[in-house]
Amino acid sequence: MSKVLTFIIGAILGLIIGGGLVFYLFGGGAPRAAQMPGVPIQPPDPNGSPAGTASVVLNQQFFDTVLATIFRDMNAPAFPLNLTGKNNSDETPRPQLASFALQNSGGCDGKITLQPNGSGVATGIRLENGKITAPLAFTGSTSIVGQCINFAGWAQANLALRYDESQQTVFGQINVETVNLDGVTPLVSGFVTPLVQNTINQRVNPIVILRGQQIALNLPIAATNGTLKANVKDVRSEIKENALNLYVTFDFAGTK
């Protein structure tokens, strides 16, 4: 049998076995994102913002500076690979990956680590075309059938915003759309791709964007012997001119 034919057969078997086994072990379907607090943030009211609304603008430079600071002054964000395919907030047990297939042993750290740059992309937040997108460069390792596999690549994700009134907090939800691995065989890709997607969707979310305590008001007014309070009642958002615009509506009240 020629080397070319051997490679083709190996590739096909890798896709079938890897994809089928991952489908079984993860319980079927695409990896599920962790249960998120709050509700999706809606665009601004076309009829205009209600009284008591203020705006918070987070531009592209703000996000670039935050990420650059994290990679420069802190440890690179790292997450244990989610080998069980289990939703962290889901109490229903999910099938665990068979020990003969994937393990975190033999010197492998079993983690995925985000990198500032890699695979021809720069990790970042992009505000364009009315959407928030996030290319994510990463490296990682896991043990497959007792062999340590190191991998690298990048993922394309989008970021959706949610507001939880009970927590007075704006959350971000990363959703990985595609995973691109560098120079791995189809068999390895069949195992690693859903692991990376599942791990980022499960371990990264939810992301705290803005806490209500940061913008809520609680101001003593000495002349009235009272306190002016304002809690966040609603949050709307839009992407405009390479900036995230948050429109925060307050519920004002005074106490004696």
Image (cartoon, rainbow, N blue to C red):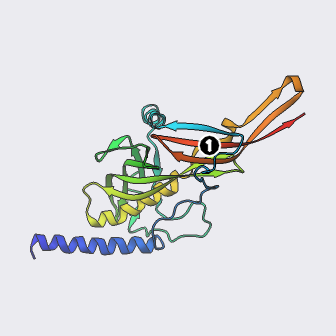
Number of marks in picture: 1
Task: Please state which amino acid type lies under the numbered disc 1.
Answer: Tyr
Element type at mark 1: strand
Q: Which residue is drawn at 45% across and 53% down?
A: 158
Q: Choose top left, top right, bottom left or bottom right for residue 254.
A: top right
**Front in this rendered view, residue 61 or 129:** 129
Instruction: Tell me: 120 left or right of 255.
Output: left
Q: Residue at x 36, y 65 (%)?
A: 191
Q: Choose top left, top right, bottom left or bottom right for residue 71.
A: top left
**Front in this rendered view, residue 62 or 18:** 62
Taking the view exactly as shown, the residue that stands out farthest to the left is 2
Taking the view exactly as shown, the residue that stands out farthest to the top is 223
Q: Choose top left, top right, bottom left or bottom right for residue 213.
A: top right
Q: Residue at x 44, y 57 (%)?
A: 176
Circle 1 residue: 247
Is 163 situated above or below 85? above
Q: Is residue 110 visible?
A: no
Can you say which quadrant of the picture contains the N terminus? bottom left
Residue 43 is situated, as x and y percent measured from the top left of the image, at 57, 51
Residue 144 is situated, as x and y percent measured from the top left of the image, at 35, 63
**Front in this rendered view, residue 148 or 237:** 237
Is 152 situated above or below 69? below
Residue 248 is situated, as x and y percent measured from the top left of the image, at 65, 42
Instruction: Tell me: 199 left or right of 232.
Output: left
Can you say which quadrant of the picture contains the C terminus? top right
**Front in this rendered view, residue 222 or 129:** 129
Residue 147 is situated, as x and y percent measured from the top left of the image, at 32, 60
10 Å crowding of disc 1: few (<14), some (14-19), many (20+): many
Instruction: Tell me: 240 left or right of 44.
Output: left
Q: Is residue 73 visible?
A: yes
Taking the view exactly as shown, the residue that stands out farthest to the front is 47
Is 36 situated above or below 240? below
